[in-house]
Image (tube, rainbow, N blue to C red):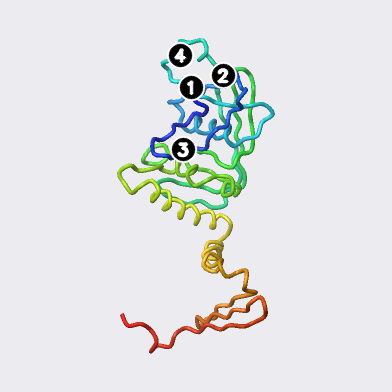
Amino acid sequence: MYTAGLLSISDFMLEPVQIAAPKELELERCYRFHDEDADEVGCGNAHLLAALGTFAEPFVPVHISTIYDGYTWAKLPTIDRVELSVGATIHEDGIWRGKISGVESIALRAETSDGKVFESPVCMALRPDNTEWGTNATVLVTREAEHRLVPSDLMYHLGGYDELSDSYDTQLDQFTQELNRFWAELVGRNEWFRRRVIDVLRSQLDDWKSVVVTAGCEVIIVHGDGRREEIAPPAPSDEPKQ
């Protein structure tokens, strides 16, 4: 009759960041959003605050269908206000079907009808983005999000899964590749290049002391035992015919 969290769960495996409710927590100590249909960004941020924040006491928003509004058990305190504080922007880009912005810090604050305040730093939040096509949300992330979240957590907010396109696994793989590039660019301008080089060399790194690529495309490897190996590009006559 109710679910922990305010964001919908897709039938196609894609889910938002999940909220872990303590098993002993009574429903009466949970919160409903004051109007889940009126403020999608505020509702989303309340969910993300509960899922990613740290609090002295449990903060668990729940979704209860309006068909149960007449029942006394459904009359819970509400989340009436959600505020967002954001640090300086580091890097932003468009990925998948949305916009993502890497920032120095993110904090969310929720005020409830029973007079309580829940606030915490988080690694992801949503910010309204008014465009000529309407109001969308920019996904805000800190560097911590790369290591704390899985790609599907962000894909949910950046366009989700398209039922009319490729399979879920194919779309998630494509999204992950775009997201990995964003994470690298969030670190620094040359980080994407460095990661691609390391991915190619990773299986050999334990045995190699160093590797150098010259301007002439020659690869010089110094092995861990000091042995030097030089790999020159093929001569023109050795190149395979087209």
Helix, strand or loop at mark 3: loop
Sequence order check, earlier mark of 2 and 1: 1
Q: Dividing the picture into quarters, in which one does residue 13 lie?
A: top left
What residue type is disc 2 on?
Answer: Leu
Q: Say above or below: 19 vs 28.
A: below
Instruction: Tell me if label 1 and label 3 are in contact, CB under 8 Å.
Output: no
Indicate which label's residue lies in the foreground, 1 or 4. 1
What residue type is disc 3 on?
Answer: Glu
List the single residue furthest toward the right: 56
Where does the image place residue 163, in percent across and percent down from the top left? 33, 42
Residue to which mark 1 is pinned: 2
Q: Is residue 109 left or right of residue 242?
A: right
Marks 3 and 4, Cα distance to the nearest angstrom?
Answer: 26 Å
Marks 4 and 2, Cα distance to the nearest angstrom?
Answer: 14 Å
Sequence order check, earlier mark of 3 and 2: 3
Marks 1 and 4, Cα distance to the nearest angstrom?
Answer: 12 Å
Where does the image place residue 127, in percent across and percent down from the top left? 51, 38
Q: Nearer the viewer, residue 165 or 216?
A: 165
Instruction: Tell me if label 2 and label 1 are in contact, CB under 8 Å.
Output: yes
Marks 3 and 2, Cα distance to the nearest angstrom?
Answer: 23 Å
Residue to which mark 4 is pinned: 69
Indicate which label's residue lies in the foreground, 3 or 4. 3
Residue depicted at x 38% and y 43%: 161
Residue to which mark 3 is pinned: 15
Q: Nearer the viewer, residue 19 or 187?
A: 19
10 Å crowding of disc 4: few (<14), some (14-19), many (20+) = few
Q: Say above or below: 110 vs 212.
A: above
Q: Dividing the picture into quarters, in which one does residue 67 lie?
A: top left
